[in-house]
Image (cartoon, rainbow, N blue to C red):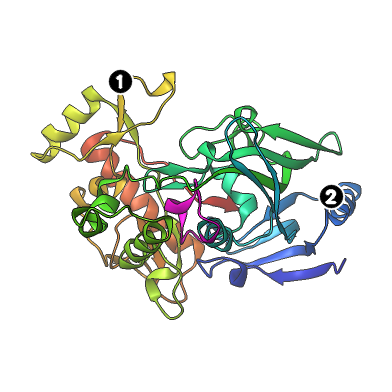
Amino acid sequence: MLMEENKPLASFTTFGIGGPARWFVEAASEEEIVEAAAWARERGLALFVLGGGSNLLVSDAGFDGLVLRVGLRGIAVAETVEDSGQTIYQVGAGEDWDGFVERAVRDNCAGVECLAGIPGTVGGTPVQNVGAYGQEVASAIERVRAFDLEEHEFVEFSGAECGFAYRRSRFNSADRGRYVVTRVDYRLTPGGAPTLRYAELQRALAESEREGREVSLAEVAAAVRRVRRSKGMLLVEGDPDCRSAGSFFKNPVVTEEQVRRIAECSAKEPPRFPAGTGPENMGRVKVPAAWLIEQAGFAKGYALGAAGVSSRHTLALVNRGGASAAEILALASQIATAVEARFGIHLEMEPVMLGF
């Protein structure tokens, strides 16, 4: 392994922001992950696992520890589940996520088509329970293989053992920082129908449905990418709205009473979506954070120094050029304070914060 010192981290993030890592290494195998973890442990260094850097804000001072970039690659069709006919794909944590979605769609396997165009690596998908346009990886993950930094051994979790909820899992909550994901197994359905629950996606594909044609997985994935691009949520070279971490705030899950209060404060009925399955979501709905932000007075293109709100989507904060992490956080704080003052709703930041 090549252990690098004072490695700049900004270029490893979609924000393009952040100071250096005291130490940096890229692991291409499970053996190298074990070696890097031992190296950090022997020196009493904090360890941070870096994937695609698409959901990350690094502090201006950087990180005084070891950044371990996971580079394990490979996509293998492992088995077919006899009772359901579904196919298990075993995917290295360092694989590009959108590349895997393309592979699944090309193989005509349903289960992740609505998650096209999301930047980052496969290893990050179970951590955040990545979701968009009516799908979450929780519905497709069969198992997760990871290295346990406390017990110094490899473990495997079934999907049920991952503790998935909206943008949450055991890996970013109860067991935050304990596991290094090395492989994710997805259970997909050959020849399955695409997921078309999301209204915006239904509208984008309405013409095909009017023609009476069955919409293909490839059409759905292409439509998702078009919608994401229209919002600046697709990585496109030279597009300033792409210098972001995607959605900076989570959509709040609220009670019906809170929805009524929001409506009273805005003189408008807020949009709402199902909060998801599970007992914790009974009687609750999801309200778009972007709508709350706009109603609190922050329009697309709003700027605070070199930090700004995307010109195409109020949920994305962007680096307008030379922004510091401090400027991004100042803008985020200004927005969250305004939303809470007007609606009594606390917005939770979505990106991982490193070095703060």
Cα–Cα gap, marks 2 and 1: 44 Å
Q: Judging from the image, what secondary structure is the residue with disc 2 in? A: helix
Circle 1 packing at 10 Å, graded few (<14), some (14-19), many (20+), is few
Amino acid type at image mark 1? Gly
The mark nearer the N terminus, 2 or 1, is 2
Q: Which residue is mark 1?
A: 283
Residue 135: percent from the left, percent from the top? 43, 43
| Residue found at x 65% / y 62% | 62
The question of residue 112 being in magenta is answered with yes
Residue 326: percent from the left, percent from the top? 48, 61
| Residue found at x 84% / y 49% | 37
The question of residue 93 being in magenta is answered with no
Residue 134: percent from the left, percent from the top? 37, 43
Q: Out of 328 and 156, give the one closest to the viewer.
A: 156
- Seen in the picture, residue 165 relative to 96 is either above or below; the reply is above
User: Could you say which disc has been placed on residue 131 in the image?
Assistant: none
Report the side of 90 relative to 160 (left or right): right
Amino acid type at image mark 2? Ala
| Residue found at x 56% / y 44% | 188
Residue 42: percent from the left, percent from the top? 91, 48
Q: Judging from the image, what secondary structure is the residue with disc 1 in? A: loop
User: Could you say which disc has been placed on residue 37 in the image?
Assistant: 2
The range drawn in magenta is 106-119
Circle 2 packing at 10 Å, graded few (<14), some (14-19), many (20+), is many
Q: Nearer the viewer, mark 2 or mark 1?
A: 1
Number of callouts: 2
Report the side of 281 relative to 43 (left or right): left
Q: Out of 113 and 117, give the one closest to the viewer.
A: 113
- Seen in the picture, residue 116 relative to 173 is either above or below; the reply is below
Report the side of 126 relative to 28 (left or right): left
